[in-house]
Amino acid sequence: NAGVTQTPKFQVLKTGQSMTLQCAQDMNHEYMSWYRQDPGMGLRLIHYSVGAGITDQGEVPNGYNVSRSTTEDFPLRLLSAAPSQTSVYFCASRSNLAGGPGGELFFGEGSRLTVL
Amino acid sequence: GNSVTQMEGPVTLSEEAFLTINCTYTATGYPSLFWYVQYPGEGLQLLLKATKADDKGSNKGFEATYRKETTSFHLEKGSVQVSDSAVYFCALGWGYQKVTFGTGTKLQVIP
């Protein structure tokens, strides 16, 4: 009954370092996405994928990279971390069968990233 | 573009008080509307949803009605509990797989 699993839960980086946030889901969901949550700004979409091998940019994609080689995994890479990327990151998934705009998103517990 | 505006918090209420959190939206077409809740230290989870005008979503004593004429989806609960303390997000689902979130409203319920 794992749902959406994110690792690590906490990470501190120095400016310029790179890292990968991991996201895995065991619900066979086609759609996966990454959001960042910042005070006063709600959740903003970074990247999303509607299936293995397919990714697309969201609202705030700069500085982040994604790939989707399997249905289960959707890692988010920070190429060269900046203090502006200090945030809480959430991975979310949904079944494409839910279709259209009415499907429920399932969220991981979040990864808190601090860039010094 | 499509957007969601929800009332700013924090909202502080005494236990058993009536809760309203306002949410209005701007959208073209026929969006779905959601309320998600985030408990401390956790990810968001769906609280309720409505997929067409005049639909009422309800769960755990919370209700919201999709009002197309006023472009609103206000969240209400008749009697809040301490365990309802959380951040509440209004969200708009539109197009194919698009979801736009509001900025969140923090609710604190005191005994």
Image (cartoon, coloured by chain):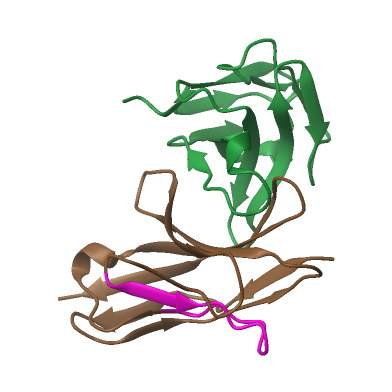
Chain colours: A green, B brown
Pick whichever, B108 or B84, lies toward us: B84
Q: Residue at x 50, y 80 (%)?
A: B74
Decide which of A17, B106 is in the foreground and name it.
B106
Q: Main secondary structure of the magenta part?
A: loop
Decide: is B96 above or below B75.
Answer: above
Range covered by the magenta-colored residues: B61-75
Q: Along the line of sight, which residue is nearer the eye, A114 or A45?
A: A45
Q: Looking at the image, can residue B102 be seen?
A: no
Q: How many marks?
A: 0
Residue B111 located left or right of residue B6: left
Q: Horizontal and vertical percent for residue A77?
A: 70, 20
Q: Is residue A64 magenta?
A: no
Residue depicted at 58% across the width and 43% down the height: A98
Q: Residue at x 62, y 31 (%)?
A: A32
The residue positioned 45% from the left and 64% from the top of the image is: B88
Q: Residue furthest top?
A: A69
Residue B67 screen position, x and y as percent? 59, 83
Horizontal and vertical percent for residue B11?
40, 78
